[in-house]
Amino acid sequence: MKKTLAALVAVLIAAAPAGAAEWLPLGPRALGMGGAGVALAQGPLASYWNPAALGRPTMDSYGIQIPVTAHAGLTGDVIAGANDLKNVQSACPGGADCTPGNITKALNELNHPGNGARIDVGTGANLKIGKFALFVDGFADVGAVPSIDTVNTSTRSTDSTYVGKNTSALILKGARIVEGGIGYGHELPFVPGLYLGGNLKIMNAQVGYASQQIITSNNGNSDILSNFKNGAKTSSNFGVDAGALWDLHRTFDWMPLHPRVGLVGRNLNDPKFDLPAAALAAGETGKYSVNPQVRFGASISPFHWWNIAADVDMTRNLTPVDNVATRNFGVGTEVNVFNRSWINIPLRVGLSKNLAESASGTMFSAGAGLNFLHFMIDASGSVSPKTIDTQTQGQSTKIPRELAAAVQLSLLFGGSEQSDSSPSSAASAAPAAPPAAPASVAPPQPTPAQVQQVQQDADKAQKELDQQKPQ
């Protein structure tokens, strides 16, 4: 059991990093808030979450951010089925567990629609100066799905269909994609608080496809890794992202709670990449498509130190696991302790749910950070309380159905305190003092004619006073 689980995880991780077909909550701030980041996007990572926010004035908005996020999910009993099939085969012939019923049960565990495992990994470097961002991000979207052999199921080694010859396999497919590009955001001059932005990026993809038999292969995974890496097909394309962000409080200053709404679309041009020869030989057709994704977000800030946000996917996003899709909804909150320009401790919690899969459980997330001067470090995690057995025959271990983790290092500076929800903004902005008159400016000097006129007026007034005195 441990060897099968370790081999599967090692294969998926080794296939990373690369581009995502489902929306990956890149960075610990959004992950800690249940995956909500479209309306609260700011700083360099806004190029991913909502490029319109690149034009938003916030404290500590310039600089560099380096995020890393990893997500893993299991659907069905793929691990239990693989382990049970290996256990039955090792007991045959003659063992107590070598029964047709156990073989059928193991194959049925593998043969559920949507059965599989997937891993998504994202990392990158994002730099923002002014309203522009430069970024190089790498993503992974790799899945393992079972292929079932229902012929070789005999328990007798003398039969031509002996279970030891069973060719049931785990098939790996997915891609590694690196995106490099530029983003820009700008506030519309005729609608204060309404921002528009976009990214233009070059995408380089390595699409892989390989299979590993559960029984007849050796216990190592060097062959599958070698086949996946060496057989990957490399091709390039370009991608277009666009976003909008409306800070309603800037448009209507009477509106309470500082509400914001945002909409972002990634890979709107539907970039496609070449399939490897192994995928074509297995019957795969067409191209590997990074489908367009659209996500909506909203947020409020009841106080300058407290943010609440929610996101929902407007598109049904595909995954490398056949018949499994994602359409995530997430909600979360962030409380900024201290909330000063030189020190802050953001605390975050959230919930998320895959609306496209009724069997998926609610994930719970939490995270925290430390912002000291211009250096910031953040970390978050998310886990589903639902668990899956690693096998049903023999000793079993329960593992989470889905989990994710993220860390980020940042060096940020500059920007503006105009936004009151920045994680490192000052607690309150002091009222501006009225401008003082420049000390170096001397009062204007009278002309000689003006001096003479004043003297004449004074002499006349004195004569009138003397005439009024009693004799």
Image: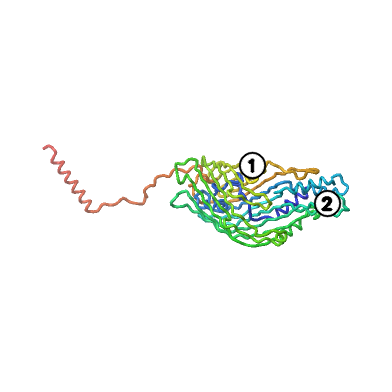
SS for dot 2 = helix
Q: Amino acid at mark 2?
A: Val
- Whole-percent x and y of residue 226? 74, 59
- Which residue is disc 1 drawn over? 364
Q: Which residue is pictured at 67% across the width and 50% down the height? A: 323
Q: Which residue is pictured at 47% across the width and 52% down the height? A: 187
* Numbered badge on residue 163: 2
Q: Nearer the viewer, residue 49 or 242?
A: 242
- Counting residues from the N terminus, which is met first, the one under dot 1 or under dot 2? 2
Q: Which residue is pictured at 71% across the width and 62% down the height? A: 277
Dot 2 crowding, Cα within 10 Å, few <14, some 14–19, many 20+: many
- Whole-percent x and y of residue 469? 14, 38
* Numbered badge on residue 9: none
- Whole-percent x and y of residue 293? 59, 52
User: Rounded to the nearest whole Å, what is the CA distance between mark 1 and mark 2?
Assistant: 42 Å
Q: Nearer the viewer, mark 1 or mark 2?
A: 2
Q: Amino acid at mark 1?
A: Phe
Please indicate whether residue 122 sits to the left or right of residue 216 in the image.
Answer: left
> Can you say which quadrant of the picture contains the C terminus?
top left
Q: Nearer the viewer, residue 149 or 72?
A: 149
Please indicate whether residue 128 sits to the left or right of residue 4 in the image.
Answer: left
